[in-house]
């Protein structure tokens, strides 16, 4: 599942840049939207162009926080012996911070790297894969491994989620990912918060259990 604007209430890195350097944000994002630069180049350029004291970024990230219904979902996953993976095209810096603040640091996460030196930011993309059909900084679909008998569900909201979502068995989608699922006829359900997902997944589990009973 995705992190920014899925678990977190807004896109954290985007909000940091937009708040601290609105002119840089506008200039670089427009080049990205026009297709002149890739997501990786866009992120490198943003990091290179801004100066933000780490404390200011931290306060901003903490003020965004996570969707309060996510706790119930994390509990649900644990209770149903399912596994959750966070796949983010954002950064370890604020993902770890927000998860730790919520006592959720045990959830495995794969994301890009961010290192602060004073008010300078350096970013790295160890999970970039040039062979992916989506040219994102972090190719999320490399983590979607087919396993016999396992149902894989994706939860997300953005363009960076599309390569992984299209390779899963079912998708919970909002915003851009919802449009992508509709356009590509991917089996999905719209969601606004995790309560909706809990209800729908509980139904799925009950049906699967009933099916298994009938089958035996
Ligand atoms: Mg997102
Ligand atoms: Zn991919």
Image: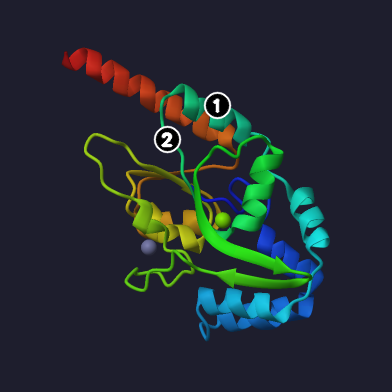
Depth check, front residue: 177 or 86: 86
Q: Position of residue 132 (x, y in %)?
A: 34, 68
Residue at the (64%, 43%) spot, across then down:
99
In the image, residue 43 above or below residue 90: below
Label 2: few (<14), some (14–19) or many (≥20) C-alpha neighbours in 10 Å? few
Ligand 1 image position (quadrant):
bottom right
Label 1: few (<14), some (14–19) or many (≥20) C-alpha neighbours in 10 Å? few
Query: Could one spot residue 194 in this view of the protein?
Result: yes
Q: Which mark is residue 75?
A: 1
Residue at disc 2, secondary structure: loop
On screen, residue 196 versus residue 117, left or right, reads left
Query: Could one spot residue 172 in this view of the protein?
Result: no
Residue that badge 2 annotates: 83
Residue at the (48%, 29%) spot, across then down:
77
Q: Position of residue 66 (x, y in %)?
A: 68, 43
Q: Position of residue 78 (x, y in %)?
A: 48, 26
Identify the mark nearer the N-term, 2 or 1: 1
Quadrant (top left, top right, bottom left, bottom right) of the C terminus: top left
Quadrant for residue 26, please give it.
bottom right
């Amino acid at each position: 599942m995705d992190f920014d604007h899925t678990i977190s209430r807004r896109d954290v890195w985007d909000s940091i840049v937009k708040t601290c350097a609105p002119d840089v944000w506008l200039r670089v994002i427009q080049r990205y939207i026009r297709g002149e630069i890739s997501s990786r180049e866009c992120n490198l350029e943003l990091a290179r162009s801004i100066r933000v004291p780490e404390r200011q970024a931290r306060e901003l990230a903490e003020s965004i926080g996570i969707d309060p219904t996510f706790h119930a979902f994390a509990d649900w996953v644990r209770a149903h012996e399912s596994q959750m993976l966070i796949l983010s095209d954002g950064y370890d810096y604020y993902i770890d911070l927000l998860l730790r603040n919520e006592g959720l640091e045990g959830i495995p996460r794969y994301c890009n790297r961010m290192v602060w030196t004073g008010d300078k930011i350096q970013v790295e993309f160890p999970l970039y894969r040039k062979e992916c059909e989506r040219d994102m900084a972090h190719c999320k679909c490399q983590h979607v491994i087919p396993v016999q008998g396992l149902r894989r569900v994706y939860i997300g909201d953005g363009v960076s989620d599309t390569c992984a979502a299209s390779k899963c068995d079912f998708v919970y989608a909002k915003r851009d990912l919802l449009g992508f699922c509709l356009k590509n006829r991917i089996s999905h359900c719209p969601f606004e918060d995790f309560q909706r997902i809990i209800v729908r997944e509980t139904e799925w589990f009950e049906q699967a259990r009933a099916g298994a009973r009938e089958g035996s």
